[in-house]
């Protein structure tokens, strides 16, 4: 099985699929091709959210603000999974989630100058090669060399306060829920009470439906993080936040 | 075969696929993950339009304005098909279309409080279980109990008039065609003539191309219902209607 | 393998898949269902860009501004590939790219008046039939007749100038890159220099990353054509162009 993730929209991912299917009969599953454009942090968040639900697979992920620069191309072996993509940190958090013990390999490739679409010409073939060689068995003769170092991703940490916590919005999902970096456990004691979010009052509840339609709610999403939401509406608009925005939660 | 339908956008459906693929080798086919947000009527319309074209399959459908409330989770056996989703009526019209004789089962599940994504944690596993047990054979020991009752969906009926008919817009498709609840047969005698739609003149024709580009036309779509359209344009804009809007057709 | 391409958005393509899966166990791969609405030239461009990367397959393509008119439905045999769709030229450039020697067949079908969705009722069944009969072997008894003629697509040619070249924008991709009909080789001598685009200065470079974030760049994309881009931004906005716009490149 090979999963595909990117910020490519359509139809570029289809070219990647064609290339893979030239070399492999693997089942192909799209994770998303609508990741926020060139947003490595958002992609890392979503991958960690989604990929651990999959059975063993090769995950080909291309969110690549550094295309055309010297950044390396890597494969990470993480337990029964492999991750293929640019060496920009996007693969690392999910790799650690999949398996504590990760091995990183560099993909050797010739870059025929500018007329190159790395997703199609580098990462798709590498994903097919890893799949065909086997996640346990791919090696140097398949074009992969153990990497001396790799780019890690610093995930912003929330800051504890006496009367609450300050974090930030990591991503906004398609429902408009603003997902923060604040762990859900921080909200445990507050359910049933009101809190303030950047100075605005809102009820802390376990579910969206605990407030009326179109009402603000601070809750914990399926990802386990604190989320700013509106029942049957868009939390990002009503809390006036977007990815990267500071979120100051205060207990009251 | 398992089909997937939702209003989730991306990437949440991928987590559902991962969960299913842990338990099943079924072919997965996306119907849509762009159904209008939490619009049970629109989803019911599209399912009835699309699913009957499929060979026998398990159809997992999550459009769920009541997530977090007490609404049940159900499986409907409809002939050679099974439908899995929230008990909010969305599955019922297509189930009746697939087979006159439907059986409804409740899905038993533990709800570990708020940190739950029912699509991933309840409906995807249930779809996999039904698929693996077999549509004819799933039963109580698989976690399904015959339901005493279930939510039905009242589809709005058009009202006959002496000089026409009054209905409403059910959905607007991605082309901008406003699809009404008025049966196509009601337009039969009018092809070639003009009608009025909410007081505005428009030709009734069998095809979009029977009028010039960018011209209004009242026609019958592939779904068999009366449609307000514009040849190579958006009917919803030009007729100033959106889902739920009243549509008064008058013969002239 | 059957690939699907259209401008249908969602969920109409799912009905096509259901119909195909009634007749065939073929692997289905979506190329795109987001092609620009009824834009035959854009679809022809993308198909030529993507389909040659696929192993032998039946490619079902429905971008059909002439639906409801007398336009024919065709299958093209192009080497080991077959292409199925309306006879409006969209299939021809990619067919020639796949194989110099193309054979064109007309699909015989009954059109049951207006209540027809040709993608679902004509092209999907034809694609399944071609797939099941075999790309080498489908013939008259499968409902296909050699065509006397077919619609070709005139691709606009750039005009050479003493001090540059004038072309036009063919498509804008999801990143906002404006892809022109000007062959990349025309830019070869200019890399490292500045050029003007419709009178506006911009650097010609081999990669996006050769200019700073949010800076204009004239480059050559993976498709081999000259592209008006912005590093990590939208070229179409910053060069004020859209599909069909004239592009006057001048060397300086």
Image (tube, coloured by chain):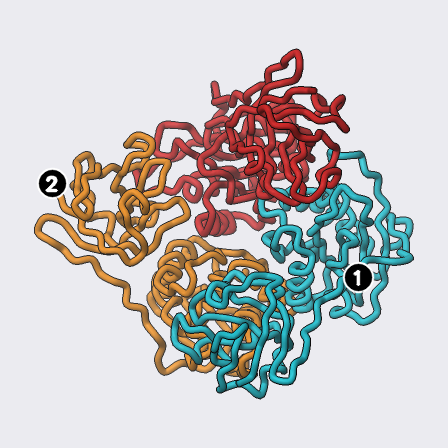
Chain colours: A cyan, B orange, C red
Residue C132 image position (x, y, % from top left): 56, 42
Distance from the alpha carbon under mark 2 to that under mark 1? 71 Å
Which residue is drawn at the image coordinates 52% and 56% (left, top)? B30
Q: In the picture shown, does residue A13 fall above or below B77?
A: above
Residue B9 image position (x, y, % from top left): 52, 58
Query: Is residue B14 at least partly visible in the picture?
Result: no
| Label 2 CA crowd tier, 10 Å (few <14, some 14–19, many 20+) | few
> What residue did someone put label 1 on?
A152
Answer with the quarter of the image where residue A160 lies. bottom right
Element type at mark 1: loop
Chain on which label 1 sits: A
Query: Is residue A212 at least partly visible in the picture?
Result: yes
> What residue did someone put label 2 on?
B252
| Residue found at the very far top of the displayed protein | C162
Residue B227 image position (x, y, % from top left): 29, 46
Respond whether the residues carrying marks 2 and 1 are from the same subunit: no
Residue C96 image position (x, y, % from top left): 61, 25
Which residue is drawn at the image coordinates 75% and 60% (left, top)? A91
């Amino acid at each position: 099985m090979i999963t595909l993730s990117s910020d490519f929209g359509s139809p570029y991912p289809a070219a990647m699929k064609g290339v893979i299917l030239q070399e492999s009969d693997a089942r192909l599953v799209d994770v998303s091709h609508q990741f926020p454009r060139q947003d490595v942090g958002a992609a890392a968040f979503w991958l960690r959210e989604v990929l651990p639900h999959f059975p063993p697979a090769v995950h080909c992920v291309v969110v690549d603000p550094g295309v055309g620069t010297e950044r390396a191309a890597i494969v990470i072996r993480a337990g029964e999974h492999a991750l293929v993509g640019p060496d920009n940190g996007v693969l690392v958090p999910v790799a650690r989630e999949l398996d504590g013990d990760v091995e990183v390999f560099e993909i050797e490739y010739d870059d025929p100058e500018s007329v190159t679409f790395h997703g199609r010409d580098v990462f798709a073939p590498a994903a097919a090669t890893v799949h065909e060689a086997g996640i346990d068995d791919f090696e140097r003769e398949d074009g992969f060399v153990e990497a001396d170092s790799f780019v890690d991703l610093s995930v912003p940490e929330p800051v504890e306060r006496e009367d609450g916590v300050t974090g930030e919005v990591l991503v906004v999902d398609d429902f408009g829920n603003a997902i923060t970096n604040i762990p859900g456990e921080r909200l445990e004691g507050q359910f049933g009470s009101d809190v303030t979010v950047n100075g605005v009052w809102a009820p802390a509840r376990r579910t969206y439906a605990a407030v009326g339609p179109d009402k603000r709610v601070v809750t914990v999403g399926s990802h386990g993080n604190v989320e700013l939401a509106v029942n049957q509406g868009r939390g990002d608009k009503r809390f006036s936040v977007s990815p990267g925005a500071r979120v100051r939660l205060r207990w009251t």
